[in-house]
Amino acid sequence: GAVVSQHPSWVICKSGTSVKIECRSLDFQATTMFWYRQFPKQSLMLMATSNEGSKATYEQGVEKDKFLINHASLTLSTLTVTSAHPEDSSFYICSATYPGLAFNSPLHFGNGTRLTVT
Amino acid sequence: QQQVKQSPQSLIVQKGGISIINCAYENTAFDYFPWYQQFPGKGPALLIAIRPDVSEKKEGRFTISFNKSAKQFSLHIMDSQPGDSATYFCAASKGTSGSRLTFGEGTQLTVNP
């Protein structure tokens, strides 16, 4: 079935550095990808929606200059956390979709990236 | 974001029992209501979904009940098993199933053997 792969699955970085997270659709063309952030024991909060070849749409309160999203191809979207701080430590999850996604077909989620900023 | 409220926050059920999780939404434009299951350290996986033109949908041990007038929907897990222990999220969206989802707060389900 359709698979979304996220890399890395976990990353530790020092405060002030930048971290890039990749989201790939392995066997379908993802025209739209969503990026979520999830803090421990909390729900998924949508950060931004990215459409291939265009600028991402950010949710209210999400700093677009801090969370850079690039969706340069139909199979790859990247989220770069710039100048990371400890409060950016979280579980980041992407999902991918395409036109005509059938009602019973799942919105495909990656397995998430655990970011820890020290 | 439009809200989806979920309860209870946590639930403990004995093996073989019925687990019931409830959600309520505000936006009447929502027309797709999925339930997701998430294990620790993993992304959410779709369990079952419903559209508002039906009041109930069943897939195996999982059933969604939908009350359009009350703007509420619930997940019933029959014959709950320890392997069902996970966090469950309801969600809602407008338009196609691939649209942006608004998630509920989540329910931590523990099924005791």
Image (tube, coloured by chain):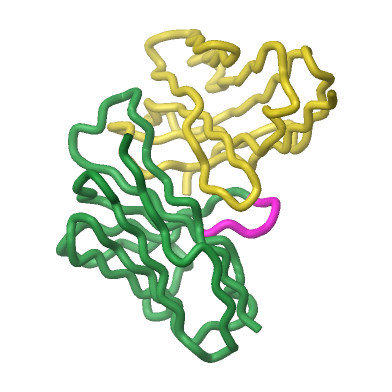
Chain colours: A green, B yellow
| Figure check: A109 above or below A46 | above
Say which quadrant the C terminus of chain A sits in: bottom right
Magenta segment boundaries in residue numbering: A37-42
Q: Quadrant of residue A73?
A: bottom left
Residue A40 included in the magenta stretch of the image: yes
Identify the residue at the far left of this view.
Answer: A53
**Which residue lies at the image location 29% right of the left edge and 51% below the top edge?**
A25
Q: Main secondary structure of the magenta part?
A: loop
A24, A38: nearer the viewer: A24
| Figure check: A4 above or below A80 | above
Q: Quadrant of residue B54?
A: top left
Does residue B86 appear to the left or right of B92 in the view shown?
A: right
> Could you say where residue A70 lies in the image, as x and y percent from the top left?
27, 69
Question: How many numbered marks have been drawn onto this rendered protein structure?
Answer: 0
Does residue B97 appear to the left or right of B66 in the view shown?
A: left
Does residue A67 appear to the left or right of B22 in the view shown?
A: left
**Which residue lies at the image location 33% right of the left edge and 68% below the top edge?**
A78
| Figure check: A4 above or below B91 | below
B51, A96: nearer the viewer: A96
| Figure check: B34 above or below A79 | above
> Could you say where residue B101 lies in the image, as x and y percent from the top left?
42, 42
A103, A29: nearer the viewer: A29
> Could you say where residue B21 lies in the image, as x and y percent from the top left?
67, 25
B104, B78: nearer the viewer: B78
Residue A103 included in the magenta stretch of the image: no
Say which quadrant the N terminus of chain A sits in: top left
**Which residue lies at the image location 23% right of the left edge and 49% below the top edge?**
A30
> Could you say where residue B40 lies in the image, as x and y percent from the top left?
65, 48
**Which residue lies at the image location 50% right of the left edge and 27% below the top edge?**
B47
Identify the residue at the far bottom of this view.
Answer: A16
